Image: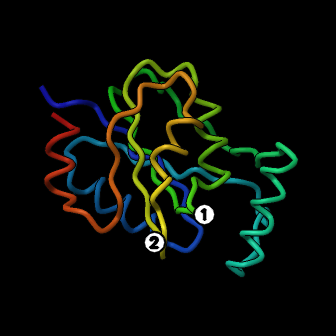
Amino acid sequence: MAKKVLVAYYSWSGTTKRLAQQINSQVPGSTIFEIKVPDNTFSNDMNKTSDISKRQLANNDLPEVVEQVEKLNDYDLVLVGGPVWSGAISTPVMSFLNDIQGFSGQVAPVYTDAGSYDGYEASFKKSAGKLDVIKGFEGHQDLNAWLEQVTR
């Protein structure tokens, strides 16, 4: 029996959104959920956004996620999409992971990057706390093979 899948994503530039939509279209019966933070939390400039994110981390002041997933425990698997920021997960994704600590299913990172992503999965797992994290997907790998593996 196929797992019931939620595709949750935060996208700063639109790249992760496109990947999340692709995944949603390829996983029958999946639901898509956009992780949103208040308007004007980040700049349209990548370098300024990086600085804002670093300040959030230094001050332990993560942005608020403005909507929550309804009936989260109805899902077996949550694919959590987000961009790689300075080799780690974005602060909105960290906030989302904090918000879903009571989730009883599996969680897998889905991430897009413009450069270095070597520490992403370790950073994700650390931020996931008690969540059951499985192998994730980096935006340049074989999506079909990964989806087959994690959704069955």
Residue 111 % position (x, y): 43, 58
The tag on residue 142 is none
Query: Alpha carbon of mark 2 to alpha carbon of mark 1: how far?
Result: 13 Å
Q: Is disc 1 surrounded by few (<14), some (14 to 19) or many (20+) residues within 10 Å?
A: many
Disc 2 residue type (three-letter): Thr
Choose between 139 and 120: the one closer to the eye.
120
Residue 131 % position (x, y): 49, 25
Taking the spot 20% from the left edge, 48% from the top edge, the residue there is: 147
Residue 29 % position (x, y): 24, 41
Residue 72 appears left or right of 42? left
Disc 1 residue type (three-letter): Trp
Residue ID for mark 2: 15
Taking the spot 52% from the left edge, 62% from the top edge, the residue there is: 83
For the N terminus, the image quarter is: top left
Taking the spot 61% from the left edge, 36% from the top edge, the residue there is: 68
The nearer-to-camera label among 2 and 1 is 1
Residue ID for mark 1: 85
Residue 81 appears left or right of 100? left
Element assignment for label 1: strand
Residue placed farthest to the front in the image? 118
Q: Against 39, is 4 above or below?
A: above
User: Which of marks 1 and 2 precedes in the sequence?
Assistant: 2
